[in-house]
Image (cartoon, rainbow, N blue to C red):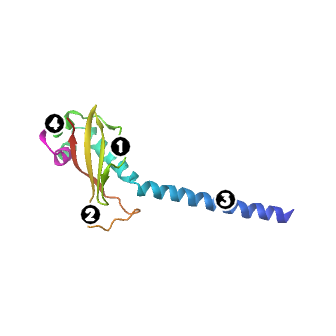
Amino acid sequence: MRIYQSKQKHHRKWVVIASLTLVLMIIGLWLGNMGYVKLALRWELDQALATKSAKNLHLLKKVSVDPQTYHYLKTATGSKIRRLSDFQGGDQTHGYYAGLVKGKGISVWMVDKDHSAGSWTVLANPEWRIESLQVRR
């Protein structure tokens, strides 16, 4: 009886280790597939659109590629980005995404500010920021 219980404990230990390994692999794949960048984009743009504070308007003006985009985003206060695409192109330091803000298509370029010199690693990329926004006509 004791041998059987010992084997059960040993088996449970390996199941837990295998499960944790699988979870870590899935998280690593998600991070490697630019999932983190998409999350950063959504958070940063939603924060900028939350209110018409001076800080938010400054950010929107800085990243808007033209005056029409800035004016549209300024009037979209309180909106959120919807239907955000997956990574559409770019490289290790730049990424292109698309989405909708208040019903209009928007193009977004993200840049990795900390690793723009090319030393990008999957687990250490916390500085992705919006580089430019453009409302599609």
Q: Quadrant of residue 126?
A: bottom left
Foreground of the two, 129 or 48: 129
Decide which of tag 1 and tag 4 comes sooner along the chain: 4
Decide which of tag 2 and tag 3 comes sooner along the chain: 3
Instruction: Kindly identify which residue carries mark 4.
Output: 71
- Give me the residue at 51% from left, 59% from top: 25
Element at label 3: helix
- Give me the residue at 40% from left, 62% from top: 122
Q: CA distance from mark 1 to mark 3?
A: 36 Å
Residue 102, can we see it? no
User: Quick check: is 64 in the magenta stretch?
Assistant: yes
Instruction: Kindly identify which residue carries mark 3.
Output: 15
Mark 2 surroundings within 10 Å by alpha-carbon count, few (fewer than 14), some (14 through 19), many (20 or more): few
Residue at the front extreme?
A: 89
Decide which of tag 1 and tag 2 comes sooner along the chain: 1
Which residues fall within the magenta stretch? 59-68
Q: CA distance from mark 3 to mark 4?
A: 56 Å
Element at label 4: helix
- Give me the residue at 62% from left, 60% from top: 18
Instruction: Kindly identify which residue carries mark 1.
Output: 85
Mark 4 surroundings within 10 Å by alpha-carbon count, few (fewer than 14), some (14 through 19), many (20 or more): few
- Give me the residue at 56% from left, 57% from top: 22
